[in-house]
Every structure is written in C-alpha cells, then in structure tokens.
Amino acid sequence: MYLIDKEVKEMDFHAYWDYRVALDLFLGGVGIGVFLLAAYFSLVFKEKSFKVTRLGFIIAPVLVGLGVFALLTELGKPFRMLSTFINVNPTSVTSWGGFLQTIFILLSFVIFLVVWKYKQNAYQMSLFKGLVIAGSVFALAVGIYHGLLLMSLGVAGWANGLIPVMFLVSSILSGSSVLMVVEAVFMRSIIGRGKEVYSETAASSDAQVFTYSKLLVSLVGIQALLILTWRISLNSAGTEAIIAYQNLISHFGVYWWILVVAIGLVIPLTIAGYSTLKKIKMNFYTAMIFTAVVLIGSYAFKHIILYSGQIPLAGL
Amino acid sequence: MTKYGMVIDLHKCVGCSGCSIACKNENNVDTGMFWAHYFHETKGSFPNVNYKYVPTLCNHCEDAACVRVCPTQAMYKDENGLTLHDPDKCIGCKSCMQACPYGVINFNKNKPHRRWEETAAAIKGGTATSKELQERTGQELPYYNADRAFTYEGIRSKGIVEKCTFCDHRIKDNLRPYCVESCPADARTFGDLDDPSSDINKVLAQYSSQVLKPEKGTKPRVFYVRG
C-alpha cells in the first residue's frame, strides 16, 4: 500500500528541528574536539602544555554550553528541561544526552578550575589525570551522542551507522583546528615570532613533538573516507535511503558539494597534506584559513544532514 | 487484558472528512492541526486510474517509536495499549514527531485557539467577529468540549505536542471514539483486539487487512481493510 501522497507531503514539509539544533551539534562538537586534544596534550606533554590546555579546558565547556543553550531555545518548554533528569527514559538517546552533556560540562569546568588553582602543579596530580580521563570519556560520549541522536530516530536520512562516526570525526577535526588557532592567537610568543611557526605546539618536548598538520590531515582524510563510504553504503541501504540522499542533493546539492566537500574537505586536505608532505610548517595565516574552512565545512555538514533528513520521502 | 485497536474499511469510507471535523470538535483541536487526518493518492494512467482516500490518525503502535524516543516519558503506553501523552512532562523537543513514521503528532508552535481573538468578521457587516462571540458568550473558547479535559488537557498549551488518544475520555465510559461514532458511512470499527468476540476481530477475520508502513516495525493498531 502506498501511504503518503507526494503532493501533500511536499506541501506540508517544514523542518521540525531548525538551525538551533544544528548549532548544538556544531558548537558541542567543536567543544568536545577542543577538549579531547587539550586532554591529550595535558596527559602527554603535562605542564609544558599548560597555556594551551588551560585555554582548551575552559573553551570546551563554554562551547558545549552555548550549544546546549541554542538547543534549549528550540524546545517548546525550555524551562522544563530539568525534567529530563527526573523522568528518565533509558530507551531515548535524547534522554542520555542531557546527562552526558551536563556531566561533560561540569567535568571540564572542574578540570579548568583545578588547572587555574594549581597551575603547572596540577599536571602531576593523580586527581587531575583521573578527571581528564573521565572528561575524555564523556567528551567522546557527547561526540558520539550527537550523531546517535539523529540515527536513533529511525529517519531514513539519518538511519545509518556511519552518521555518529562522521559527526564524531567532524567534531574532533573542527575542535582540533580551533585549538590550533587558539594557541596561535593567544600565545604571544608564537605570534611574536613573525607569524611564522606554529605547527609545532608549545607542548612539544625534547622527546616528543606534536605536529598539528599530521593530525589534521589524518582527520580530514578519515572524514573524506567516511563520507565516501557512507555514500557508497546508501546504494545498498534500500529505497528510503536512496530517496533521502536524493532529497539531500536536490535541496542542498550546491551547498553540499561546495561547502562540505570542496571547502570542508578538499581545501583543508590540500593545505594540511601539502604541509605534511613538504614537511613545512603552516604559517599563522594558513592555519587561520585552514580552521575557517574546516569550521564552515563542519557546520555545513551537520546542518545539511540535519535538514535533509527531515524532508519527506516523496512517493513512499 | 484490553488491547484497543481500530479498523477502517476503505470500501465504505467516502472521504467526507467528517472524522476530522468530529475529532476537532471532540478534542478541541486547534486550526492548522489534525488528530484525524487523511492522505490521498492517484495511481495509474487514464483510463486505468485508481484513486484512494486513506484516513489517518495515531496508530497507537504496539512498539511506538514516539514512546521509545521521548526523553521525559511524556509519551507512554497505558494498560489498555493506548499511546498517550502527558502534557505536564512534555518539553516540546519534537523527538516524537521526528520518530513517528506516520506524521500524526502535532506541535503547538503558537498559543492555541488564537482565532477567537480575531477582530475581523468572516462576512463584513454580516457575521460577528470571533472576538465579539468571545465577549458575548463570556467564554474564552466559545466552542469548547469540557469532557476532553477528563483525561487530557482540554486545550494543550503552547510549546508541547499533542495527538489522537483514541478518545480515551470516551472509551473509559464505554463509548466509542468520536470519529467512529460520527462516521456517516460506518467505516470505522473500534474495539478490543484481545477479545475474540469483539466487532473489530470480526471485521479483521472477514477481510484481509493492512497497516501503514509495516516495514517500520511499530506494529500499528489501526488496520485498513478493502483498500
């Protein structure tokens, strides 16, 4: 039995979830990406990464908090948000999200307070390490939750196991890029060197040197591979998945190819790939451009996936 | 154990939309939203054309997606198998609307029943305005069914979702849902699916039935026969 009249569906279409949900997915994603890299720095490079990780640990909860705020404004009854902590539904991924995001924000804020209070000494504290590890677990959980939330709803455009993974990688990529720029902008010593280096973090030690380019080119590469895999998987994922993708292309095709693929993947892959292959350091302006295009790509990716998934499947 | 369901005989249904109007009256459903709705489709090419009018409403699914995804348990299954909504728990996140494969959940984006505040007459000089009617009757909502409020909010507030309840306020008094009661073609049969002697089981035994989007695995309890 054919169930839905194409004409009626097209007429009735409007997105139940608008750009504010996309902002939550985007800002929350950047936040957890910043945190994860800052956490890595703090565990590996310890107090040598003091300046950048201190910034990272406060930027992360602020960004995730801003995302949650954007989401709250989208709710019909935002002041009832606390009821998600009381009337818990274990089968609802949205219900998990309230806990995950709150715990993450609190943990990362506590970590920032510990660093703020104990400064470099904090990095030798076992409490600090424990908090950072716990924060990282929750950061990963929040990053996966963003895509899982969409996937769990059973909507054809979102019901793909690669959606949470793509969202997570996009988040880590955008967050890492932001931390790179934050480091470049806020750490005067680097800028003072004549806009030169900064591919190696201030966290570098004699034994280990962290290179942003390698991380970023890997992440962009993985994301490109994931999107390609996701696209191929749609071919055998059934009629609904194919139509959902056709909806994406017919409504957002230009934005998808330009913002997500060209700006969000090809340009950063070229920049970071070139730097890695040539073993040269990205200068300040290149890093700024890199981060800008990655952020544009990340937001566009999440926005388009969110909106296109809500387009009715004509003919089904 | 009671398990309520409904059968709609598409051969009897004449597509008058009486069910939609009756539902609106019974449940105080605001302009722009429907608890009882329909879709239609035309298939084939002339002269072999098939036109189908299919009334829709909440399917009160056994494995309701809306119940699964609701973060606050505002959507729930009651002991009679009805999928109901607690307006006091609803945060208006619209997850249920996203998850419902049938698009039968409505969201109160604005203050409901604002049309009663309109000051323009339908026919200028010929009819009263909604506002005048409000003032003359002394009622905020001149047409309002107070019975609805026995089991659910009589008027659902801005910022929450709402949907068909199978007229749970009526069936608790052994009355049939109002769309069933008011259907002029007697196309709807309501009853207990767990009762072998119920009318609904007799209809289901007589005809082969279909449900909407069976592939979604929600096990709807609204069945269609003679489609």
Image (tube, rainbow, N blue to C red):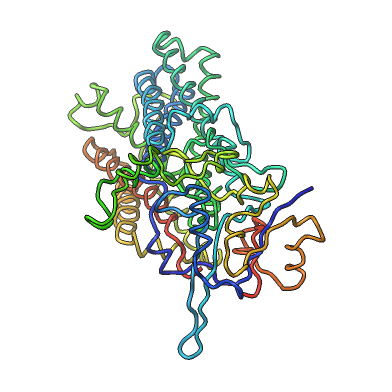
Residue at the image position 54 percent from the left and 68 percent from the top: B54
Q: Position of residue B179 (x, y in %)?
A: 57, 58
**Left or right: A207, with A286 as reference point:** right
Task: Determine whether, in the image, residue A112 is placed left or right of residue B217.
Answer: left
Q: Quadrant of residue B140?
A: top left
In this view of the protein, can residue A179 be seen by the observer? yes
**Furthest residue in direction left, as rendered:** A194
Q: Nearer the viewer, residue A208 or A298?
A: A298
> On the rendered structure, is B107 left or right of B62?
left
| Total numbered badges shown on the rendered structure | 0
> Residue at position x 62%, y 67% from top?
B186
Taking the view exactly as shown, the residue that stands out farthest to the right is B196
When the figure is inspected, residue B3 is found, relative to residue B139, above or below; the finding is below
Q: Is residue A99 above or below residue B190?
A: above
Quadrant of the snapshot with the N terminus of chain A: bottom right
Q: Position of residue A77 (x, y in %)?
A: 44, 34
